[in-house]
Image (spheres, grey):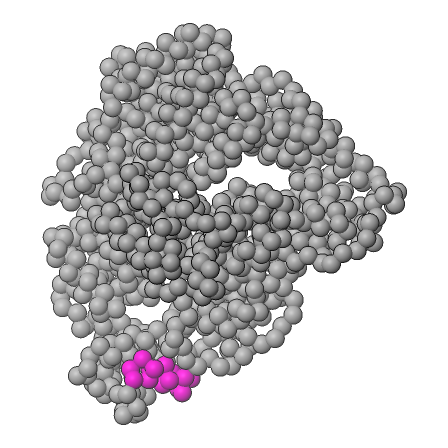
Amino acid sequence: MLRFTLLGPVQVVLDGEPLTGIAPRHRAVLAYLLLNAGRVIGIERLIDAMWGHDRPDTARSQIHASITAIRRALRGAGAADLLETRAGGYVARPEPGQVDALEFTELVAAGALREALDLWSGEALEDVHAHYVDGARELWNDRRLSAYERLVEGELAAGRHDELLDGLAAQAAANPLRERLNGHLVLALHRAGRQADALAAARSYRTALADEQGLDPGHAFIELERAVLADDPALRPAGAAPAVPGPPRRSTFLPYDIPDFSGRAAELERLVGERTGPAVVTIDGMAGIGKTTLAVHAAHRLAARYPDGRLFIDLHAHTAGREPLDAAAALEALLRQLGVPADRIPVTPAERGALWRAELAGRRVLAVLDNAFDAEHVRPLLPGHSDTLVLVTSRRRLVDLDGAQALSVDVLGEEDAAGLFERIVGERARHEPDAVREVLRLCGRLPLAIRISAARLQHRPRWTVSYLAGRLREHRRLLDGVSAAFTISYEQLDEAERRMFRLLGLVPGRDIDACGAAALAGIPEDEAEELLEGLLDAHMLLQLEPGRYTFHDLLREHARSIAEDDGAVLRLLTYYLHRSRAAMDRLFPDSLGEREGIPRPDTPVAPVRDAAEAIAWLDAERSNIIATAVHGPEICLGMLALALRPYLDRQAHHDDALTLHTLSLRRSRMLGRREFEARALTDLAWTHWRLGEYERAEEHAHQALDACEETAERARALLTLGNVALRRRQDAQAERHLRQALDLTRIGADTWGEAHVLGILALVLDRAGRPEEARRHLDLALALHRKVGNPVGEAMTLDHLGVVLRHQDEPDLARTRHEQAAALYRGLGDTAGEAAALNGLAEAAGDPARAVEEHTTALALACLTRNRPEQARAHDGLARAHLALGHPARAREHGRLALGLYGELRVPEAEEVRTFLEHAEGLPEHAGELPEHTGEPVRQDALTP
């Protein structure tokens, strides 16, 4: 029997045995075709699924090779007809029961939840990597969790409450405002004979609801609380039944365990010994001592004892050029490793910490927190009451981490150090024991130094151990310990490689490519690439991604200690400026005029061939550019901000935008450059508006007006003020600002800006009851955007047309415009704009079931871009759609989420949602009469000012 598994490792299983020899890339293509079984998938769609924007030149041939390999495997399994070629592409036609993911969907639909969950053997698509995989994995893992929640409800109804308590408590702690979940917890506690705990849980929910939302529990919860207080016999279980195990939850993110690990027997005995309950073990020691290697090796030894998850995160406390990972970012990464969907992860660190502790409750999880700064760095990441083991590595002793077991790691003992050296070098080490001891002494028995020296000897077959020891001894007076190993490697480089090594130590970013290194050193690109490859061969650089080079932390520090800046960082920053401009000219040809003020480079930069190469380069270099702007020379920052602002805005890199525009503002004020100051202020205003921080947006926009002399920047500032007023429903003020902006764009003959202002002004006119005037403005805006070749503006205008048409009771035409807008945004990679268009599509659906589907997709996209206005709009729409479908509990859940977001944004929609919730609180299941909804949800439109 042939079977395909996607709910775990992707495998082709024949008669119970997995077929071998199918490469990971081929399995990724096969998985995508099976997930879309019955649909014709074109080769362009396959290429996009595999690589996204970062497609290689050989993408088409690689897809053809994958199809050939898949067909060969299917023929060998007797299923040659499963994959068919059609005019438009390929279609997979598996038989019923052959694909576990499709079977899972059918079983869930049939209510066979236990059987459906038993199909899982790990994370969905566990061992394949492609552009589509993260999104697909998150979707399927969320479906798995939804099925499990339904199963738990059934088990509780059947009276099997004791087995559910731990999981229910954890989930309720993570979701304190979910009424149904808290009601289940109260009932389970009561049935377990814990009436006081049940009432305490009810009070906690009531208090949380009042504090957070200013609301009282629904009628059903109040009745349950009353019945618990009275010990109502109707709450007692009907009878006992066998316990129901939950679905397997396995997450493995441990790095590779090196095969030549040596020694550390005493430390390992302490780490892997038997223990009960939660435990935190700190592993401290100097740089290069092998803390991470020890922690990872111990974690692999312990993995079987922690079946619910083996997690790993690098906190980057001592990574040059990077800020330590803060608690919020670390908690988000850890929660994602546990399989928590993005839309369930709260915003604040405190809420994320509470969810993290709740998710760990009742689980046996092992977590490695690598490279911590101090106790305060890791304290928010520690578990509550659970059987979780946390291993923390740090260069500092974390003496003030209460309750932690400390393990200080020293250099290797002589035997262990010799064992490590011999494992790497092999036979030569056994013939020269005295020389080995001398090498180990000169290396300070530091594992990293031993590895570097041994690797050098391993790749020099004519060297003896004695010769290596002599080379190390010559530098003993200059550099000790690990520096001796670094220096011997450095001295073996030729002069050009030594200069490149020193200059790379000055780079503020995390990595570099050959073009950047060429600019840094002021040499041709091919020469730079040759030098980088030489350093890579000498193990003085690492290559974690093809074509990109980086340092180990200690080697970076060593390079920096011997480097002298001859203007190298200035050359690198200048290169980043000109290459960014070239990439932006490919991505945004409609706004070439904005970048005319950036001078042309003295020496040509590598050309950017197309938009795909432009976005790939910007995505790879973004963090390096920002780091160089922050830590490098304070020059050309205004021009760099001018070049990058459309990319940072469209890709929702708002934190980086704030950093860069703030630097530009500070520098422009220092130099008295009013034009750059005005531009920085308008950019900051716009970015704060994007984030829903309206007061700060308004403040910067007014400052920009005071500083502005150019009509274009004044128009942008007024456009931002108009958008802020529109969000707040201050329509008269919005119209005044926007008409002033419109006049300025026309005075300046700014067709591009005029079109944008017309599109926003149309929304104001539509809400003021002037739809025909709004339509005229939008028709003109659309024509202007098409005239200047601005697809983003065209998409925005189509989306706005959909809104106006819906208000004019033309839902079919409205949906057509929203669909056109969504398709344009999707093709541009504008996720924020696509979220807005999908929300508009859902609002024009007329069918609550379809609205749920479209709002849910919009919500996922809005979460990806941290787009709070569209998140609120999606939750608002989901609340109303669920109530129309007769699901008041789900409606209340989404309504409360919308209320929280609207409250943070301080927009009028908050009161409308509060009224909605008051109506929905008393409704039983399957009641769906909606209160009148007079307002228009707050919008986030992906235009670039």
In depth, the one of 18 and 350 nearer the eye is 18
Percent across and percent down for residue 651 are 36, 37
- In the displayed structure, 415 sits above or below 111; it is below
Q: Is 402 placed above or below 341 here? A: below
Q: How many marks?
A: 0
Which percent across, then down, holds residue 681? 36, 29
Q: Is residue 70 magenta?
A: no
Residue 425 part of the magenta segment: yes
346 to the left or right of 200 = left
Residue 814 lies, with reference to residue 247, above or below; the image says above
Q: Residue at x 46, y 72 (%)?
A: 297
Residue at the image position 40 percent from the left and 51 percent from the top: 31
Q: Is residue 454 left or right of residue 775?
A: left
Residue 573 percent location from the top left of the image: 23, 45
Q: Main secondary structure of the magenta part?
A: helix
Residue 752 or 886: which is nearer the viewer?
886
Quadrant (top left, top right, bottom left, bottom right) of the C terminus: top left
What residue is shown at x 69% (from left), y 40% (from top)? 180
Image quadrant assignment for residue 521? bottom left
Direction from residue 560 to residue 809 in the image, left or right: right
Question: Is 893 or 328 nearer to us in this picture?
Answer: 893
Q: Which residues are magenta?
A: 413-426
